[in-house]
Image (spheres, rainbow, N blue to C red):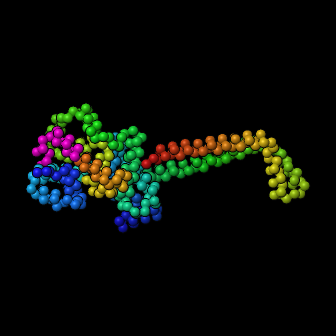
Amino acid sequence: MYENRNLVRRILAGETHIFEKLVRNYQRLVSHIVFRMIPNEMDREDICQDVFIKVYQNLSNFRFDSKLSTWIAKIAYNRCVNFLEKKKIPLFDDISEDEKAVERYAGNDPCPDEYTQARDLKKLLQREIDKLPIQYRTIITLFHLEEMNYAEIGKITGLPDGTVKSYLFRARKALRERLESKYQPEELWK
Amino acid sequence: MKHLSDEQIQGYLDGNPREDIKEIESHLETCGHCREELERYRILSRSLAEDPGFELSADFAKNVITGMEESAAEGFLFKVSRIVLWMVGAAVSLGIAIYFSNMKTVVEKFRVMQAEGRGLFESIWSALQNLFSGSQQSLTLFALAGLVIVGIALLDRLITRFHREVTCF
């Protein structure tokens, strides 16, 4: 916390080169949010860059009433939401509809490649996470990768804590169901 | 035996404080099915916490700094363009005012007053009283000035909107 205060104070005092350090400290967090929320690979890095420019422009408004990471994550989330709204990509599809769409598109059976990867749960999960509604993906990412609690995720997404918890449970359950419908339990849970 | 609900298992795994924590733990001790469910969620959670390998370019941080400088230049250009716009608007409004007013009469009156040896303030005030003659001209003038102001405001809004789209977050 003290280190962040010092970092922010120095950037605001005009030491803009120090901002590069802040970018390095938080680029993992921002990339996790942006890469999970933005489907088009070509747009991702530009959006990450936009997020940090916004962070710089608004740094003087940051009052340390939350963690710096939460504040930066909120900016990243809002930037992605704006982008998705412009592209008319829904943030939240009904999961059952989404599942139907996935089944219509790819069928319910894994492709031969997936069979060979069946032992790599991480790879299978990445594939299945990408098929979840964007809101679910974001919450899973913030909770598991960034180790944020429901309240912090609520601050970032603007959702009540109870909704965050409910979406997280539903997302994990959906992932399990999708995986278990394609693979044998002994292949997955070992 | 009634098994634990999905919510109870996931909540327990997340370490959520629950009133029924002792019940859950004692159930888990005796129920293989629920222990298996818990274990599957535990494996799933562990895999979800593994780094997905999203990679930004190696010079990302440097690119951000370059982007910041470009953004600052754009911001300066934006401010300058707004100032220029309002100055042009003010000049156009003034031009319209001069065109529709009796400026010649005003200048003549001012010269006469000065020749008569009146004070500067009195000369200006008296000359300005001749600025508009007839209510018809005044109405035209106000209507045109109003249109110019609305036009400037709309242009200003367009520039602001364009700027927001360029630097929208």
Q: Residue at x 83, y 57 (%)?
A: B122
Q: Residue at x 62, y 41 (%)?
A: B151
Which residue is at the front of the view, A88 or A94?
Answer: A94
Residue A66 visible, this angle: yes
Q: Position of residue A106 (x, y in %)?
A: 23, 33
A17 is higher (above) or lower (below) than A170: below
Q: Residue at 16% across / 61% down in the picture?
A: B22
Q: Position of residue A179 (x, y in %)?
A: 18, 42
Q: Residue furthest front?
A: B1
Is the magenta region chiefly helix, strand or loop? helix
Q: Does A1 sit above or below residue A44?
A: below
State which region is magenta.
A173-190
* Residue A119 percent coordinates (x, y): 14, 44
Q: Is residue A179 magenta?
A: yes
Relative vertical location of residue A160 with respect to residue B143 in this rendering, above or below = below
Determine the image quadrant of residue A25: bottom left
Residue most toward the bottom? A2
Counting from the top left corner in percent of width and height, residue A127 is at 24, 42
In the displayed structure, does residue B11 sit left or right of residue A39?
left
Residue occupying image coordinates x 16% and y 42%: A180
Q: Quadrant of residue A124?
A: top left
Lateral position of residue B147 relative to residue B68, left or right: right
Q: Is residue A23 visible?
A: no
| Number of numbered callouts drawn | 0
Instruction: Please say whether residue B141 is one of the residues in the magenta stretch.
Output: no
